[in-house]
Amino acid sequence: MKRILTHTTTILAAALLASCGGKGSGEGKPAGISLQNIGSDTMVNLAQAWAEAYAHAVPGVSVEVSGGGSGIGVAALINGTCDIANSSRKLEKEEEEKATAKYEGKHPTEHQVGWDALAIYVHPSNPLNEISIEQLSEIYKEGGKINKWSELGIAAPGGTDEIVRASRQNNSGTYHYFREAVVGKKNDFKAGSRDMNGSKEVVELVAGTPGSIGFSGIGYRTDKVKVLKVSKKTGEPAVEPGIRSTLDKSYPISRPMFMYTPPAAKPEVESYIKWILSAPGQKLVIENGYIPLEAFAPKDAK
Amino acid sequence: MHSQSPPPVTFGETPFTRSKRRREKIAFAVFAGMVACIVIPLFLIVGYLVKEGAPLISWDFLTTNPVGGMRKGGIWSALLGTFWLVGTSLCISAPIGVLAAVYLNEYAKDNWFNRVINLAVVNLAGVPSIVHALFGLGAFVLFAHMGRSIIAASLTLAIMTMPVIIASTKESLAAVPRQFREACWNVGATRWQTIWHIVLPNSISGILTGVILQVSRTAGETAPIMFTGAVFYRKIEEGNFFAYGLADQCMALSMHLFTVTTQVTNAPHALPFAIATVLLGFVLMVNLTAILLRSWLRGRKKW
């Protein structure tokens, strides 16, 4: 009896180990090459769409996409842990220097892959249709004068006059850009904003909160939020974010989207970037709600 | 009130027995209510998840890659990723954890050093998973140059589950009566012979239960794998169980659920619920195996 018991034990333990041991030792790495693509949250859905389509176009190459924010992508570029870093902002000087030091004096290559218009979202019940950069600045910056919807001359949407400000966490490229373009580099954000962890979360917060306002990439637009027209100064004509208005710069808050590659990149990286900058890649930019490079913009686009 | 007429039968109802029975009823109601407080929300949660997610769940959902910006298609690459992470981490944590527990319970002397080790194990079990994630990022991904990979993520998960495996294994080893060991030593057996022939066979059910229950924890964790090996998206060969290698990054169910809810716009309403249902089903199946295994092994116990 004891022997039987011991044997069952041994067999069971062996089976447990073997069942995962088989998996663990499996050298079943698929043939082909995989590229690490990491960074901007604004671009992660687009990067995923590219990766998915590229897997069909060039079956041997698998692109692994991670998000996290432009800061994460840039850090990965500096640490040498990625093949392509997505960033919705330019490299800062300090980062450029660090990256150059890492790659023994050679600079990482910058590729502009499209544009993102930073849209200002409000709840659909909000009667406001347009807003100026000055007003946005007063809403968001520390010491800004606008705290209530009535100060913008509209009735409080949903009965709450207080403006609920949705913002982003501070390693987000969107946060950096908004600070630079709207709040002002020297100013801080007003305390008490809701700093969301992802582009979609901002839009969802706005969709569910009548008294809120938020900024996020135009690619995250849904039919549950309203996109405001934006003017440079109060009183000037406000412009709707769109392909034309972004490309001719009449929409005041748009920014280029970049992919950075290390100096001596694999040839597969180069062909991937080339594909992104060609017609099929740029078509996906439009399909995902972003703005393509000038040469690929449809002639009849707004 | 009726004190003038004493009860005719000795075991009849007295005010004392009546109040006793009333208190018993109250106690029963309170305890049953507490159980309901636990069980009803559980059924509501599971029922709600299944109801919302059911329309999407099919064999194709389990065996195809996500497509269309992760809004359509299935969850194959995430499901397989979770299998790999759980399997690999268990292969690392189970042997080390069980053997360490055997040492701590059977060999180690009761001195200050071993007491510190025991204390450390108990404390490690309470460390939040995000701390393990940072440790994994520093130790495995960067320092050991593993890069973000399945092996780095599995090691992180293994470090996270090991203290619990050690604790539960020690518990079941300690449950084997001391007389068993003494009897064995008295017939001249060495410590190892005692462990192998007496202690382990008598505690295996508890050990396996502890190990298997860690599977559900591993499958559900997001934080430790987010920094160390899980990706937002990756396409793999459908139907091939070896589509991942140890050095690859992978998708995982828990992470996929997180990204679909926080990042993918206009995803179908049922999609996150369907992913959650699959994750829950996976954990449930593993736990069921643990329960069956335990009751089968218990039936063979000798005391």
Image (cartoon, grey):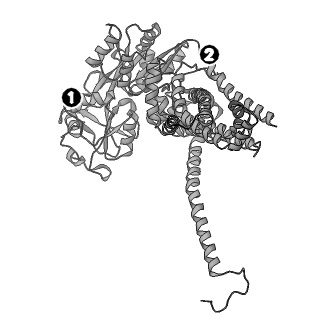
Q: Residue furthest bottom?
A: B4
Q: Position of residue A69 (x, y in %)?
A: 37, 27
State the residue in front, B167 or B293. B167
Mark 1 falls within which chain?
Answer: A
Height in image: A244 above or below B259? above
Amino acid carrying mark 1 in the image? Lys
The mark that comes first in sequence, 2 or 1, is 2
Query: For residue B214, what is the image quadrant?
Result: top right
Q: Mark 2 points at which residue?
A: A27
Height in image: A52 above or below B176? above
Q: Name the residue under label 1.
A: A185
Amino acid carrying mark 2 in the image? Glu
Q: Position of residue A111 (x, y in %)?
A: 35, 14
State the residue in front, A106 or B267. A106
Instruction: Name the residue: 59% across, 16% down.
Output: A29
Residue B246 in view, yes or no: yes
